[in-house]
Image (spheres, rainbow, N blue to C red):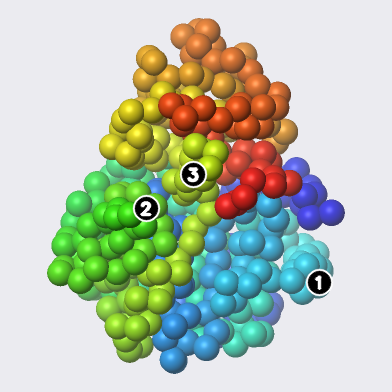
Amino acid sequence: MTDNLFSENKKIIDLTLERVSRVLEYFNNPQNSFKSIHIAGTNGKGSTANIINSTLMNVSACKKVGLYTSPHLFSYFERIKINNENISENVFLSLKKEVEDASDKLKIELTEFEILTAICFLYFAREQVDIAIVEVGLGGRFDATNVISRPLCSAIASISLDHTEKLGDTLERVAYEKAGIIKTATPVVISKSNKGYSAVLNVANQKSAEIFNAREDIEIIKENGKNFALIGKKLYEFGLEGVFQAQNLALALKALEVLPFEVTEDALARGLRNVKWRFRAQFIKDKNLLIDGCHNPDGARVLREYLDKNFANYKIRFIWGSLKHKDYNSVLDNLVRTQDELYLYEFDYPNALKHTDLDENYRARFKITENPFEIINNTEESKLTVVCGSLYMLGNLFKECEIEGL
């Protein structure tokens, strides 16, 4: 039932604020009735959002913490959480009807993401969350979430080229779109190493928004099979995998610093220890299986660096799938090496990439697998199976998975 909640015409991306603004005005702008943190970026915004969420859930002033992320893996309900609990199906469907009835009354045709965003904001307002962490869907300036008028802070995660057909084909243009979430005289958190830093700084200056630079003394290390975050000279157990998470943690910590809440040492330690973000460099040791949702060139580059550092002695076999509109050739150029085994999963999803879409070189190298679990379950000590690519593909593949640890 939940796989087909929206017609195909609703899934069209049409970036604008006018439609969703009018519908939310009908509901007296619920998005402005609670405190919020707004996060944009190309890669890392979901990890950053989850680190903040996990930490704030241990802060005494934050009894109810909302979290809005996208896309989902298995159901729409995953996108909207309070204290890490998904919105219930009954509440979701009831709010969906309210939003669609309002849009019909106003003669407004909302997109899927606009409906989801309106549902989220109504839910958070009615549940009276103390704070919500809101992740941008696409871009920033014209993303439906940008109807938030005054967040406590805006955070800009790593910026690289993605969705160029919507956001522009230069880093400066993409960064400008991401920086569109910045509000007048509202704190902005960003890393100086962010490729879009100068463009974001320009927008912040124009809006008299103070820039807070993420700290640079953070390292993710692994000891005895566990991940730790070294923050300055203090070591914390950390729930996320990969050295690349250091920049997301740095961004999250700086955002927490500018919030008007006291984050105790205990709250931080609990938050970092318990944070989870599914299918982001998730390693299942018993299966020699690694799962990652790298769906753009920069994400692929980061994953390859992680594999080269942590699995240098393994032969890598990829099970990979993508959407057609992605820059999949650049993804593959950054991800695969000559010695790797390559399998393409043609998953069941609109606009999913087919073997015939690949260029001649990759078409010759990729084998099609109709049952990836035959490969996954064929565990070899010297081989690492990496299932990666579109999050929609991962959700499609692992929806009814019984692998322990997932």
The mark nearer the N terminus, 3 or 2, is: 2
| 349 displayed left or right of 121 | right
Between label 3 and label 1, give the one nearer the viewer. 3
Residue 267 in the image: above or below residue 48: below
- Percent position of residue 91, x then y: 77, 74
Q: Which residue is mark 2?
A: 225
- Frontmost residue, 37 versus 2: 2
Instruction: From the image, tell me which residue sits under label 3.
Output: 285
Q: Could you classify mark 1 by the number of other residues whose Cα lies within 10 Å: few (under 14), some (14-19), or many (20 or more)?
A: few
Q: CA distance from mark 3 to mark 1?
A: 37 Å
Q: Residue at x 16, y 68 (%)?
A: 232
| CA distance for labels 1 and 2 | 41 Å
* Image x and y of residue 386, in percent: 49, 33
Disc 1 marks which residue? 90
Q: State which quadrant residue 180 falls in.
A: bottom left
Q: Secondary structure at mark 2?
A: loop
Amino acid type of disc 2?
Gly
Can you say whether 360 is above or below 286 in the image?
A: above
Query: Where's residue 316, x and y in %?
Result: 43, 26
Residue 144: % across, % down: 55, 61
The three-letter code of the residue at mark 3 reads: Lys
Chain-order first, disc 1 or disc 2: 1
Residue 291 seen: no
Residue at 35%, 76% in the rendered image: 269
Q: Are the two marked residues, 3 and 2, in contact with CB atoms closer than 8 angstroms? A: no
